[in-house]
Amino acid sequence: MRVRLSAVLFAVCFWAAADNGASVNSVVAAVRTSISRKRKDAELAASLDKMKLAQHLEDRVIEILESEGAGAQTLGALQRMRDASRLFPVPPDTPPGMTPPPPPSSTEEQQVWQATGSRALDYTRSLPDFICSETIHRWTDPDGKEEWQPTPTVVADLTFFDGNEHYKLLTIDGKPSRQSLLEVGGAMSQGEFGSMLATIFNPSSDTDYRWDHWTTLRKRPTYVYFFRITAAHRPQRLQFVITGGESVTAAVGQHGYVYIDRETNWVTRISAEAEEIPTGFPIQKSSAVLDYDYADVGGRRFLLPLRAEVRIDAGKRQSLNTVEFQKYRKFAAAATVSFEAGKK
């Protein structure tokens, strides 16, 4: 009975903050309390969606709450709060336990970027040949009203062999399929194993970069750098399949954030958004978040993609994919694998 009363009192405090215009500190306290009490992710997200902030919620605060255990739906609600509060004043006080260290010196800023770039450019050459399972959960919003409808979940084998990615579709909603990923239709992404890293750190990309802020990612201190690459350097190619199987493509620019582990100088997250999309192109917006973590392959640990989230807006119709990379295992040279036509 005491537990129930405590939950009721917590809810009353929560809603009182919402009525007056909640502070960032009150939102952080509410999320932390919910995590400690193991409140359901969906319930907390629904509560957050009904709150209105009076202050600007920064990405860094959301990232730290993610590191502390905030679930996927809670993070989505926090991101919506962030977007709605962009023009609000910055809180005068930093939430408890979130005071960042001093910014790096200009020398350290350059050294970290260059050290990370050297590792990134050698990344694909350092990887073994392997196979992993790629599960793509997909949703569409036909009218652009944030009313997401699930579409068939796709599972494929992704083989990394000779420095290239190859895809073989296995199932659609649990049923075996002989189709290719292109034939399935809907929003798809490829190139997670090194392509994004190589593009950002390749000298030919002439990437503009600067240190942006400190954060904590998976409980580790992390540098966050802003980056931008213009369309003239062709960092990203968008492809839109038209009814009938034909497709149109566009070379676009790209900007976003690179997350670099402070201790290892390895990239642990990339958040990127397309820019300079040609007027009249069917896709008006494209963004992706790619997370890396360590996985075992043949008895050795490698930094490999963990999950990705890809969002594409084509007019009112929006697509959202969450991709999970699992079951990494070594690819035997003697194995016989039938690959789909296009490789990345």
Image (cartoon, rainbow, N blue to C red):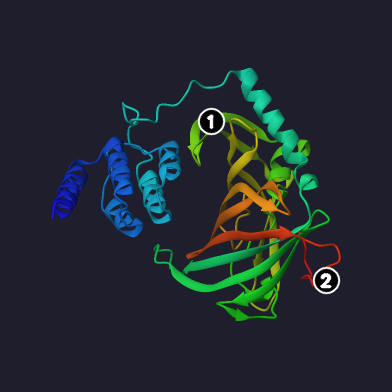
Name the residue: 78% across, 41% down. 122
Q: Considering only vertical position in the picture, is 247 above or below 308?
A: below
| Element at label 2 | loop
Q: Observer-nearest residue: 85 or 265?
A: 265
Q: Which mark is residue 336?
A: 2
Residue 41 pos. (x, y %): 35, 56
Which part of the image, by quadrant, shows the C terminus? Answer: bottom right
Assign a secondary structure to mark 1.
strand
Residue carrying label 1 = 212
| 108 vs 161, nearest the viewer | 161
The answer, for residue 334, to whether it is visible in the render is yes
From the viewer's perspective, is 135 left or right of 165?
A: left
Point out which mark residue 41 bears: none
Within 10 Å of the Cα at label 2, are there few (<14), some (14-19), or many (20+) other Cα atoms? few
Alpha carbons under labels 1 and 2: distance apart: 46 Å
* 260 or 129, nearer to the observer: 129
Please state which amino acid type lies under the numbered disc 1: Asp
Above or below: residue 295 compared with residue 53: below
User: Label 2 is placed on what type of residue?
Assistant: Thr
